[in-house]
Image (cartoon, rainbow, N blue to C red):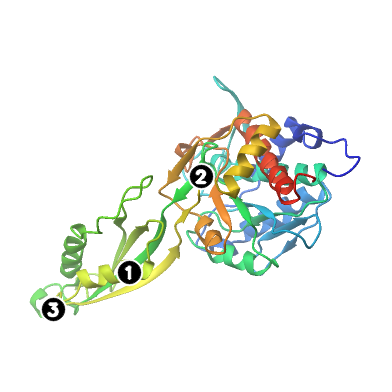
Amino acid sequence: MAAGSDIKTLAEVIPEAALVEMARLLVRTPSEQSALFEADPAVQSFIADCVMPMLERYGHRGRRDAMGNAIFESGPASGPRPAMLLGYAMTHPANAMQSPFDAALLDTPHGRAIRGRGIAEQKGSLAAAIAGFVAASAIDPASRRLLIVSTAGETGSHKAAECMLSAIDVPPALCVVAIGTGCRVALANKGRLDIHVDVRGRSSHSSTPWAGIDAIAGARVVMDRLACLDLGPKRHPLLGGATLSPTGIRSFPEATHTIQDHVRLTYDRRLLPGDDAGDALAQVSAALAGIEPWLVEVHAGVLQYPAEMHPDGAFMRALRAGCARVGIETPAVFASHGCVDAGLLERLGCEAAMWGPGEQAMWHTADEQLPVGELVAGANGYLGLLLAYAEGESGGHA
């Protein structure tokens, strides 16, 4: 802690009422997923016109990288590798949710709650991350730390994270991937490889189907083979086995009365920690060899890496010490079948885990909510981790 500093708690920097209004403002500023993904003007505006001014009010001037990610750095430019909080801007579309951007405050049997699109998935955790970063910087201005707000959140890609990592001088030592997990810490998560399968035949008029080679029939053979593909005996103690699931199918040409000459199928191949994406792709390719009379091509799509960290590693040690410092219980741990950016960070030697306020069961629902008490606990947890990590790096004399 900085010499002479009298600030010791989150509430002294950002009282509960201010934290609640911060979260509500984030919800009131729409940043929905669209076909433009990170380049969507609403997502970019959310960063530029909501997040940047919010941090500037607390004295933190950030910068933007090539994809529009917001980067905030506090403390000295040199020193030990910092801890980082990584939040997300983009939310699921409003879809069938009524009044998704009102950020209504509700009275529930469990106390007050904020209702709105993204509050349980990205924006509650983002508000908590902003509050934790601001408070840690006020309590301990002598230690280095990072807050990054990614333009991603719903894209299923490491592209934005790779951009922001190229824009900072050194990878963080540990990172909280701030997304709603019911305040549990994800010790491990599966990765994901999109696999595209193109089945090619020959088109003809549908009145003479024998003159063509029906790519839809070929796609049925592909699906039958992959439905019974043995992915191997490997089992993870927390995550179980790998999975292979069809997630998309389209046929071409998009014309009436035509035997289709091209079908593209997309498969979601979940990867366990230690799995090689190239091996997973080769396994599918081998299973689809020799399907006559069709030509079958297999291509790798977007890859997100699996992640796993030690339950007694630097992240969990800082978390336990930090929670004790701010007077909250140490969070439970779990393993996630979904993924964001923890795996990419771990490949750079950074212990990273998804952890944040907001129940995953609320994601994308028509009545998405976050209890205020959970929001406050999340911000305190982030604050405690940042302070405890800095104290550990400085030998206990932060």
Q: Residues within 10 Å of mark 2 (few under 14, many from 20)?
A: few
The mark nearer the N terminus, 3 or 1, is 1
Q: Left or right? Give the position of 234 relative to 376.
A: left
Q: Nearer the viewer, mark 3 or mark 1?
A: 1
Q: Residue at x 56, y 48 (%)?
A: 313
Query: Label 2, on which residue?
Result: 311
Viewer-proximal residue, 192 or 156?
A: 192
CA distance separating discs 2 and 1: 28 Å
Label 3: state its secondary structure: loop
The type of residue carrying mark 3 is: Pro
Viewer-proximal residue, 191 or 237?
A: 237
Q: Nearer the viewer, mark 3 or mark 2?
A: 2
The type of residue carrying mark 2 is: Pro
Question: Which image quarter holds the N terminus?
Answer: top right
Q: What x and y, as percent, mark residue 207?
A: 11, 73
The mark nearer the N terminus, 2 or 1, is 1
Query: Label 3, on which residue?
Result: 293
